[in-house]
Image (spheres, grey):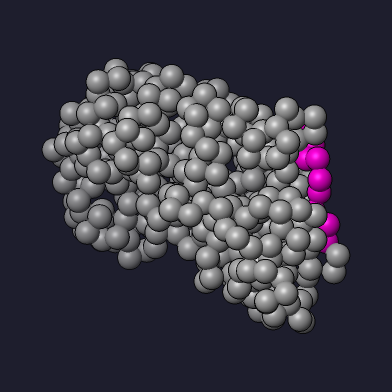
Amino acid sequence: MAHEETAKSSVGAKLVIRNIGTLLSGDLQQPVLDADTVVAKDGRISAIGREKELDTAGATCVIDANSTTLLPGLIDSHVHPVAGDWTPRQNQLGWIDSCLHGGVTTMISAGEVHTPGRPKDVLGLKAMAITAQRAFAALRPSGVKVLAGAPVIEHGMVEEDFRLLAEAGVRLLGEVGLGSVKDGPTARQMVAWARKHGMQSTIHTGGPSIPGSSLIDKDVVMAADADVIGHINGGHTALPDAQIRALCEESSRALEIVHNGNERAALFTLRTAWELKQLRRVILGTDSPAGSGVQPLGILRVIAALSSVGEVPAEIAFCFATGNTARMRNLDCGLIEVGRAADFVLMDAPEHSAGRVVLESVRLGDLPGIGMVIIDGEVRSERSRNTPPATRLPKITK
Ligand SMILES: [Zn+2]
């Protein structure tokens, strides 16, 4: 388990990835780019194009993609971290490292709710949120960017609490509805205070995940108006179809589909969003660690399910976990675009897939084989220990 400091200086680093077979942008408007080379300087994308047209001299690292597919690092929009790479939820160590091997380079906390003895008084919850934000900013497990510090709102919080949290660097609210604030209007007030101070919120949608929490139905979700309709396909228990449809139609907030949910409701959400021309609102999470465990390949599995059974082209499904999430959450990664963080996944069709190329494999429901994951321009893992083996592998040639 590799624990390391962040803010490691990448000044002077120049990464060239050449011989890319297919370049996926993460952008729904143009999911496939006509280019074979990406250059990154100091951990950020500096050029995209044809190798012969780019300045590739002076590279400190050169990768031959070997005609494989490059896409932005995957973003898991819904996780519950606790401390470093440990989770007490399934007594597991190294779960974030395992997700790196599933192509995830950024994780967003929906609340550090599994922390043993988690404080529920206002002072205690603020202290814990600031601690989580600080701890994961200072230490990235295996290089994965974990955006943490997501307090669960409780009765008694006032605007000053949100102002103080924001000033301390807390940018998220944990799942609304998991704390003592259950009614929509009170939640709405707190969500609005959070938003006013630059914090983004997610609401727990559907049936309870733990005994003692209650049903968050469509009316509560609408009344609270959080930025992300968290696990709209239930975590685990989904709302009835008519309520999911109403949320797609009446709200403009993000529609988050999670692995740890109801697969049928996930497909219903996808089809409804598609019909309403609202695919840009679809973002993906795992909700791990959860009762159903840690799912290192959870994001890939949702992409493969939505593409194969949901019948969306694979290059579109990959946008749900990259560009869509980045835009919805104002992140500097998630798209192959000059200036963005150099977070990449290189993948290929898995060995012996019925699909000839990776996009066709995913469309047929197979998981891709990951050959390399790069974060901030630095190679963090090579051939994945978790995906099926990739047919072709990229190589570091310098
Ligand atoms: Zn959750």
Q: Which of 50/384 is in front?
A: 50
Give x and y (percent) for residue 345.
66, 51
Viewer-proximal residue, 351 or 175? 351
Q: Nearer the viewer, residue 180 or 324?
A: 324
Does the segment drawn in magenta span residue 387? yes
Q: Position of residue 333 (x, y in %)?
A: 52, 60
Left or right relative to 186: residue 124: right
Residue 11 to residue 356: above or below: below
The residue positioned farthest toward the right in the image shown: 397
- Residue 55 sits above or below residue 2 on the image: below
Q: Residue at x 83, y 57 (%)?
A: 395
| The C terminus - image quarter | bottom right
Q: Main secondary structure of the magenta part?
A: loop
From the viewer's perspective, is 300 left or right of 322?
Answer: right
Give the residues in magenta. 385-396
Q: Nearer the viewer, residue 357 or 395?
A: 357
